[in-house]
Image (cartoon, helix red, strand yellow):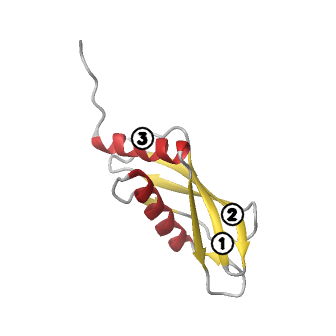
Amino acid sequence: MTIARLPVATWSLSAVAACALLVGCSASVNVGNSEPKLSSDKLATTVSEKLAATTGQPKPDITCPEDLVGKVGTTTRCTLTAKDGSTLGVSATVTSVDGKKINFDIKADETASPAAN
């Protein structure tokens, strides 16, 4: 009987997705400007750190194309890229805003996209 083995990058991506789907992640960030908004770079860093802490895996490479506006219900899509080039979509959705503190949930998509050829 042959046992298929997943490459480490695929396993790591699967672990992040499974944990983010099963456990879910939440984060809170204080922002220092007049309109509550989290920069795309800070959002990517926060999502990466939160997923790493939740899964026990190294921090994944996350990119977020836009800032997260501090308005309940606002969602921004980010992308997790594994070492093998496969990608996984990640959503950050604002759950509450307390002054300049933005609270948001993080949820990974159920399936990854394979690396481009």
Q: How crowded is mark 2: few (under 14 residues within 10 Å), some or many (20 or more)?
A: many
Q: Residue at x 56, y 50 (%)?
A: 24
SS at badge 3: helix
In this orientation, which residue lies closer to the viewer: 23 or 20? 23
Pointer 2 residue: 94
Badge 2 or badge 3: first in the primary sequence: 3
Task: Tell me which corner region of the image, top left, top right, bottom left or bottom right, holds residue 91.
Answer: bottom right
* Residue located 69% across and 63% down the image: 94
Q: Is residue 34 above or below residue 19?
A: below
Q: What is the spatial separation of the Cα atoms under label 2 and label 1, in whole angstroms?
A: 7 Å
Residue of label 1: 102
Mark 2 touches mark 1? (CB < 8 Å): yes
Q: Viewed as shown, does residue 73 lie left or right of 12?
A: right
Residue farthest to the right, as pictured? 72
Number of numbered discs on residues: 3
User: What amino acid is found at the position of numbered circle 2 in the picture?
Assistant: Val
- Quarter of the image where the C terminus is located: top left
Q: Which residue is drawn at 68% across and 81% down?
A: 100
Give the distance between the C-alpha atoms of the residues marked 2 and 3, in whole angstroms.
Answer: 25 Å
Query: Which residue is denoted by mark 3 in the rendering?
Result: 14
CB under 8 Å between callouts 1 and 3? Answer: no
Mark earlier in primary sequence (1, 3) = 3
Q: Gap in Å between the C-alphas at discs 1 and 3?
A: 28 Å
